[in-house]
Image (cartoon, grey):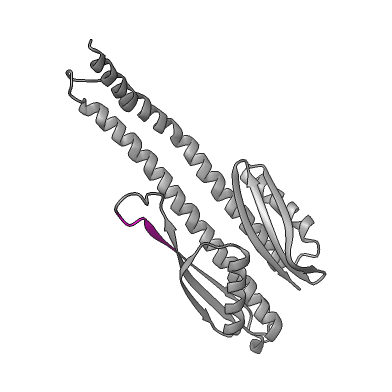
């Protein structure tokens, strides 16, 4: 086999064998990444909504509790952090919620007003 | 994989094309699904807090208050660029429709890479004229 033919054969093997296998093997991982991102978005939205409607007395504590409760039902380990971004006092405030499920990250702002 | 020296196997081309197309469809549909989900949540929360704020202040929803608070929320939440916002505020019911432009990562190609993602949210509170307490 000539050198040019060998090179051509190598490119063909990569393009027609390795590339499809690589792409198709990434499909389940892609689905899982989408699923986790959607779960993170849903959980953080539910937590923010719950905090806003219940006008939580202690948002930090209540947010973590709601997130864990919902995440347990989803079957994913959720890690929620909450920090004040505006006018936080006894009568409420603006809080940024950040939720992590593995590599998926979702952020929402919750406004609590009593 | 070659049918003969110098020619390309149609089977190889087919398998590669299917693999790449599958990957692309999953990637793009995932991107659009997540953006739509995020926009829907942003609208829902923005309208809920804006309506709730107006009802707390005035006992009914007032357009300028709801609009200002929705804008504040989008700023605080770093929401995606909204290309269209339609806000309707009635005394005890508010509704918002909005679209955002999602730029697909193919800007080098010579075709439009923008996709409009739209969502709608509504919130209502009880009307005190009928004897119910005002609440969002």
> Where residue B68 sits: x, y (%)?
60, 78
Drawn side of residue A37 relative to residue A100, left or right: left
Quarter of the image for residue A36 reads: top right
Residues in magenta, as a range: B111-117
Q: Residue at x 44, y 58 (%)?
A: B102
Q: Nearer the viewer, residue A101 or B3?
A: B3
Above or below residue B124? Residue A108 is above
Drawn side of residue A45 relative to residue B119, left or right: right
Q: Residue at x 18, y 21 (%)?
A: B6
Quarter of the image for residue B70 reads: bottom right
Q: Nearer the viewer, residue A102 or A85?
A: A85
Q: Residue B136: in sight, yes or no?
A: no
> Where residue B91 sits: x, y (%)?
58, 85
**Residue at the farthest bottom position:** B129
Task: Classify the position of the C terminus of chain A by image quarter.
Answer: bottom right
> Where residue A31 sits: x, y (%)?
48, 41
Q: Residue A83: in sight, yes or no?
A: yes
Above or below residue B90? Residue B1 is above
């Amino acid at each position: 086999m000539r050198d040019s033919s060998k090179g051509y054969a190598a490119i063909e093997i990569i393009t027609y064998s390795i590339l499809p296998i690589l792409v198709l093997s990434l499909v389940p991982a892609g689905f899982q990444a989408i699923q986790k991102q959607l779960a993170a978005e849903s959980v953080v939205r539910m937590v923010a909504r719950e905090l806003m409607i219940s006008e939580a007395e202690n948002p930090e504590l209540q947010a973590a509790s709601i997130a864990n409760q919902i995440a347990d039902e989803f079957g994913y380990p959720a890690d929620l952090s909450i920090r004040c971004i505006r006018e936080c006092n006894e009568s409420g405030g603006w809080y940024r919620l950040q939720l992590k499920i593995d590599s998926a990250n979702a952020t929402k702002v919750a406004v609590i007003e009593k | 994989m070659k049918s003969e020296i110098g020619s390309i196997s149609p089977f190889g081309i087919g398998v590669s094309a299917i693999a790449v197309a599958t990957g692309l469809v999953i990637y793009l549909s995932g991107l659009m699904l997540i953006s739509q989900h995020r926009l829907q949540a942003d609208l829902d929360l923005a309208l809920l807090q804006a309506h709730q704020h107006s009802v707390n202040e005035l006992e009914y929803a007032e357009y300028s208050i709801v609009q200002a608070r929705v804008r504040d929320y989008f700023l605080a939440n770093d929401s995606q660029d909204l290309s269209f916002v339609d806000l309707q505020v009635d005394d005890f019911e508010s509704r918002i429709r909005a679209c955002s432009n999602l730029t697909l990562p193919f800007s080098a190609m010579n075709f439009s890479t923008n996709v409009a993602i739209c969502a709608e949210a509504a919130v209502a509170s009880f009307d005190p004229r009928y004897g119910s307490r005002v609440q969002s």
